Amino acid sequence: PFLNHVLTSTHHMGKLIDGLLDLARLGRTALREMPVPMGELVQELVKVQHAQAQPGPDGQMTSGVNRVEWVVATDWPTVPCDPVLVRQVWNNLLSNALKYSRKRDKVRIEVGTRRRDDGLAEFFVSDNGVGFDPKFREKLFGMFQRLHSETEFEGTGIGLALTRKIVERHGGSIWAEGEKNVGCTISFTL
């Protein structure tokens, strides 16, 4: 039991260090902007996330999700951005949507875009998961900030902080709306 605790703690510490290194690199790395067809990127990542949520050979769900309904927009803009960094934004948001929805019998994740009045494209990921108390909304994007215990949901508390940093490096903004036990929508602009 003690050795298992040490191994688990060591693995968690490794993830924390990797996340901190990613964050530090982000501040020093120049953006490599190019036109990115956002729909193609999102479709590819949804397929990867969906495959990870399917039953493995033993019949167990690899991410604990019983059934996932993906609702993905079909009309996406091409956006000038760094494709590697924006891929990480989408990957973080999609994996969080799955993680925080996995206890639902029927998971619904909506991924889309809309044109705002100011001309910017707004992107979003919405789920019907555990949600959060709106009074703690600002903590979502803080370093090492967690609104759910690690025993309930694994993670380091770095993913959304890194996501916010990437979005801000692109001159955009990111925000969350949610309600406890109802779900969460995270939206961003670039």
Image: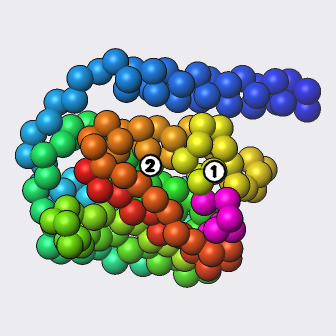
The residues bearing labels 1 and 2 have C-alpha atoms spaced at a distance of: 16 Å
For disc 2, the neighbor class at 10 Å (few under 14, some 14 to 19, many from 20) is: some
Residue at the far right: name it.
2
Residue located 8% across and 46% down the image: 35
Residue 110 marker? none
Q: Is residue 152 left or right of residue 98?
A: right
Q: Position of residue 55 (x, y in %)?
A: 51, 64
Q: Position of residue 186 (x, y in %)?
A: 45, 63
Q: Position of residue 145 (x, y in %)?
A: 66, 44
Residue located 38% across and 23% down the image: 27
Q: Is residue 90 above or below residue 156?
A: below
The residue that label 1 is drawn on is 139
Q: Provide the residue span drawn in magenta.
A: 130-137
The residue type indicated by label 2 comes to Asn
Quadrant of the image occupied by residue 65: bottom right
Residue located 30% across and 49% down the image: 172
Q: Is residue 35 above or below residue 62?
A: above
Residue located 47% across and 69% down the image: 185
Q: Position of residue 147 (x, y in %)?
A: 70, 55
The residue that label 2 is drawn on is 92
